Image: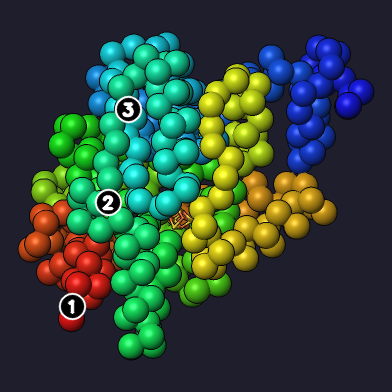
Amino acid sequence: MSTAKCSKCGKTAAADIAYAGTHLCAKHFNEFFEGKVRKANREFEVLRRGDRVVVAISGGKDSAAMLYALHSLAQKIGAIQLFPVLIDEGIAGYRGKAAEKARKLCKKLGLKLIIISFKKEYCLSLDQIIAKRNRKWSEEGKRTKACSYCGVLRKHALNKAAQKLNANKLAIGHNADDTAQTFLMNLLRNEPQRIARFGLAEGESESQDENDQAAPVPRVRPLIYCTERECALYCMLNKLPFHLGGCPYAGEAFRGIVKDFLNDAEAKYPGVKLNCLRSFLTLRARLASKSEAKKRTLKKCVECGQPSSGNSLCKACELLAVLNKR
Ligand code: SF4
């Protein structure tokens, strides 16, 4: 057991914030964590009076921490409606358990959980999509990663849900680790244009045209300054129910390699993740000011009416069309 003392009050420390050279007790850690959420709120207009916000939750620690912190902030600001939405991709032995934790958390906060399943939306669970993909793979030699199907369809389903609920914002639980990983992945894949398009605040969705009916519901990231470790600790200290298990498809993702690299680097050089995040924010601001990012207009998908980055079909309908092609 740690004998370290809180740098603020001298009580027994619950958290070692190595990159800041401090130890914090439970009370001061909560203040520190919620201070980071308020900073994101100030800088990126996460919550404002009158907002209707869909909060994307998964049953995991990040979204549990996000919902709890947003719920408390929304009560302080007032006149804000939160709609927790969980997307059930249909991953046997994984999402069901996580959904149970999400249900418990929503009950604790007095919020109604909305569950949307891939099976109902797309007539296929993720497990069925992967089984189909594997059959096609042996025939055609091409293989789309599970996370590509999952990410594209989840984004599609969340945007549709937010539109249906007449929400003006969609809050997602991306933390500082996720953002640093995405930034490095964009660099490693030579996709700098994605850095400029990464929406952070109200009005910063991919389309800059207010009259663009195909514009997605703006995404906000309240946890952008909180590390993954801090999210887990915040959940534990506040006794929030969350699921710990990993997705069986996670091993297919390139993200896993980048995540391991950043975790190793952080252990040896505390602060590299937040440095990576700061570099991303600086670079993004510079790139976004270039006209190229602003000119990007979105079209409506001819199949489902959701935003498409230029083709007649959006990415979700494109993936499903390939999958369903004989
Ligand atoms: Fe979906 Fe990939 Fe996350 Fe699994 S690891 S839930 S497949 S995005």
Judging by the rendered image, the residue that carries numbered circle 1 is 325
- In this rendering, would 101 be left or right of 239? left
- In this rendering, would 296 be left or right of 77? left
* Residue 4, horizontal then vertical, whole percent: 89, 24
- Numbered badge on residue 71: none
Judging by the rendered image, the residue that carries numbered circle 2 is 118
Q: Amino acid at mark 3?
A: Leu
Q: Amino acid at mark 2?
A: Phe
The residue drawn where x is 51% and y is 53% is 247
Q: Indicate the quadrant containing the N terminus: top left, top right, bottom left or bottom right.
A: top right
Judging by the rendered image, the residue that carries numbered circle 3 is 113
Q: Indicate the quadrant containing the C terminus: top left, top right, bottom left or bottom right.
A: bottom left
Q: Nearer the viewer, residue 273 or 317?
A: 317
Q: Quadrant of residue 144?
A: bottom left
Say which label, 3 or 1, has the lower sequence index.
3
The residue drawn where x is 76% and y is 28% is 15
Q: Amino acid at mark 1?
A: Lys
Seen from this angle, which residue lies furthest left?
302
Query: Which of the four quarters of the rendered structure image does ligand 1 lie in?
Result: bottom left
Are dots 3 and 1 in contact, CB under 8 Å?
no
Callout 1: SS: loop
Neighbour tally class for label 2: few under 14, some 14-19, many 20 plus, Cα within 10 Å = many
Residue 136, compared with residue 105, is above or below; it is below
